[in-house]
């Protein structure tokens, strides 16, 4: 039975709105952490996040097929959650045994690395619940994300500021936030979890586990950059620089929330019209967010900590990389959503290996492996020349950016081969005009509005006023020159009225 009640517009807009709220909460939490932790401590915190991600490589065995099967009306949620809990708990002792050997950089943080084991089960199970809700109520993932973002601020204030626990405080705060996210996700997944356990499913998932594992392998390789950089440079300062820059540039990734319901919609009964319309809405937010990252790179860095004010170039490089990456991901999700090879649950090896379920992860694997190899060689050679951490991070981010371009082009080629798809250059040009107008307003007004004072209370009001002014400029220009924008504004009003919709 195929499902048709997934609301692409509603879920996408809700996801984006919550994503923007998370930008604010994320900056506040990062502000708490960066202003209370030294660059070395913040580097350790980033390293913990990277190591945790390696232990999530097996989780897609469950969530990958769960989303696809639930979107097509199959009852697999209870089984998926049951095995996710078992797998996550089984990984804790493995993590602890490996974490014991990780603090070679600075043994003072060995306890923090081992304490971070509490994050593994909640992160693991949370991802599985995302897979469950993504298949039947994509907007539920947004509510879970919102709970996470709202909880981590008071938890951060409690553990990092009031108790002054440093890295350990950040771990406790994140754990509390994940518990809130899990609770919220469980609430929305409850109808699916009333179904009976199907132990035979795990055999099927394990048999075809090579597809999601292969799919996730490229992401694990991608996350090796932080560990490789720290090992070669024997320092976590560069990691702190990179992580702070990434925190700001990652704002662009929230544009992808507009498309969070497109994948399950295509799996059930979506059409090419959904793809085309969703792409235009997606780009309406992605383009100005890139502009925001560029012009607000220095103010955002100063806000996080004046020590990081000199990192504008890495932020801008990562901003363009995030922009290219989120577009590429959009195209890949469309291609995966239109793949029908697994629709009858036959999962023949020869069919799977010829499908997009195998081809696209292979492309990602080539991309991410090339990135890691070039980064490792470049960092090793440059470290021998004793250049600064800032220069190393600038080169690191430039490598990442340059490699993203050819793979974006290839994703466009693949999509155009698979379906009739137009990039609508005239519409995108209007969004670019609106973004340029926003940048001009910033250049003309920022010196009179933003004052770079060490005190947050003197700096933040001006930064907020400038930010609101820039956003209003973009919205105003695009509303005046673009009919699709006016249609989008009307759609926002209609979608959030108390009526039922199927789109």
Image (spheres, rainbow, N blue to C red):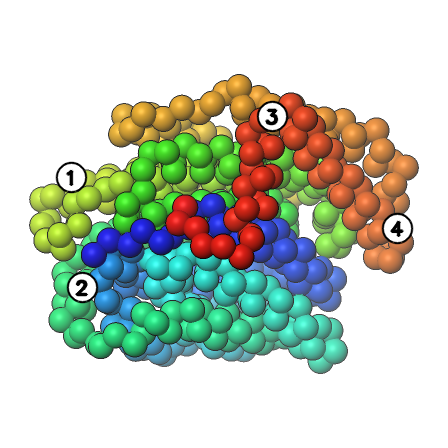
Indicate which disc, 3 or 4, sits on the residue closer to the N terminus. Answer: 4
Residue at image point 36% right, 54% down: 5
Q: Position of residue 260 (x, y in %)?
A: 43, 49
**Apparent side of residue 452 relative to residue 113 in the rendered image (left or right):** right
**In the rendered view of the protein, which quadrant contains the N terminus?**
bottom left
Distance of mark 2 from mark 1, alpha carbons?
Answer: 20 Å
Q: Position of residue 151 (x, y in %)?
A: 61, 71
In terms of secondary structure, where does tag 4 sit? loop
Q: Position of residue 474 (x, y in %)?
A: 69, 33
Q: Is residue 485 something one can see in this rendering?
A: yes
In the displayed structure, would residue 327 be above or below residue 140?
A: above
Characterize the local packing of mark 1: few (<14), some (14-19) or many (20 or more) Cα atoms within 10 angstroms.
few
Distance of mark 4 from mark 2, alpha carbons?
Answer: 56 Å
> What residue is shown with label 1?
354
Q: Quadrant of residue 95?
A: bottom left
Characterize the local packing of mark 4: few (<14), some (14-19) or many (20 or more) Cα atoms within 10 angstroms.
few
Of tags 2 and 3, which is closer to the observer? 3
Q: Is residue 222 something one can see in this rendering?
A: no
In the displayed structure, would residue 154 be above or below residue 45?
A: below
Indicate which disc, 1 or 3, sits on the residue closer to the N terminus. Answer: 1
Indicate which disc, 2 or 1, sits on the residue closer to the N terminus. Answer: 2
Characterize the local packing of mark 3: few (<14), some (14-19) or many (20 or more) Cα atoms within 10 angstroms.
some
The dot on residue 482 is: 3
> What residue is shown with label 2?
206
């Amino acid at each position: 039975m195929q499902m048709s009640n997934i609301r692409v517009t509603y879920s996408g807009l809700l996801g984006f709105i919550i994503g923007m709220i998370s930008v604010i909460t994320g900056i506040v939490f990062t502000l708490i952490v960066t202003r209370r932790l030294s660059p070395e401590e913040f580097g350790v915190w980033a390293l913990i996040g990277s190591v945790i991600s390696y232990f999530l490589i097996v989780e897609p065995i469950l969530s990958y097929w769960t989303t696809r099967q639930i979107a097509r009306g199959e009852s697999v949620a209870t089984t998926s959650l049951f095995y996710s809990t078992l797998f996550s708990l089984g990984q804790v002792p493995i993590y602890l045994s490996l974490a014991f050997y990780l603090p070679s950089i600075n043994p003072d943080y060995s306890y923090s690395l081992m304490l971070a084991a509490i994050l593994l089960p909640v992160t693991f199970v949370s991802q599985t619940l995302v897979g469950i809700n993504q298949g039947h109520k994509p907007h539920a993932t947004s509510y879970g994300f919102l709970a996470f973002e709202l909880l981590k601020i008071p938890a951060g204030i409690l553990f990092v500021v009031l108790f002054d626990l440093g890295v350990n405080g950040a771990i406790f705060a994140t754990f509390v936030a994940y518990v809130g996210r899990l609770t919220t996700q469980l609430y929305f997944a409850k109808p699916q979890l009333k179904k009976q356990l199907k132990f035979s499913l795990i055999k099927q998932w394990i048999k075809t586990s090579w597809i999601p594992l292969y799919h996730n392998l490229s992401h694990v390789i991608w996350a090796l950059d932080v560990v490789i950089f720290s090992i070669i440079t024997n320092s976590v300062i560069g990691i702190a620089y990179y992580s702070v820059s990434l925190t700001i540039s990652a704002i662009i990734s929230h544009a992808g929330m507009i498309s969070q319901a497109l994948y399950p919609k295509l799996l059930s009964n979506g059409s090419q019209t959904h793809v085309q319309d969703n792409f235009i809405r997606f780009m309406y937010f992605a383009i100005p967010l890139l502009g925001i990252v560029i012009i607000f790179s220095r103010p955002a860095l100063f806000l996080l900590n004046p020590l990081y004010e000199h990192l504008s170039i890495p932020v801008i490089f990562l901003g363009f990389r995030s922009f290219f990456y989120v577009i590429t991901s959009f195209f890949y999700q469309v291609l995966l959503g239109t793949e029908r090879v697994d629709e009858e649950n036959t999962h023949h090896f020869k069919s799977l290996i010829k499908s997009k379920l195998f081809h696209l992860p292979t492309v990602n694997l080539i991309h991410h492996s090339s990135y890691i190899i070039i980064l490792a060689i470049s960092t090793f050679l440059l470290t021998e020349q004793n250049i600064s951490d800032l220069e190393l991070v600038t080169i690191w981010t430039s490598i990442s950016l340059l490699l993203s371009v050819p793979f974006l082009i290839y994703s466009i080629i693949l999509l155009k081969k698979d379906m009739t798809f137009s990039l609508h250059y005239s519409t995108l040009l209007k969004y670019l005009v609106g973004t340029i107008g926003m940048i001009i307003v910033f250049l003309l007004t920022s010196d009179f509005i933003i004052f770079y004072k060490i005190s947050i209370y003197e700096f933040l009001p001006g930064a907020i006023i400038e930010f609101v002014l820039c956003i209003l400029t973009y919205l105003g220009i695009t509303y005046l020159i673009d009919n699709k924008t006016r249609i989008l504004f009307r759609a926002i009003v209609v979608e959030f009225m108390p009526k039922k919709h199927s789109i």
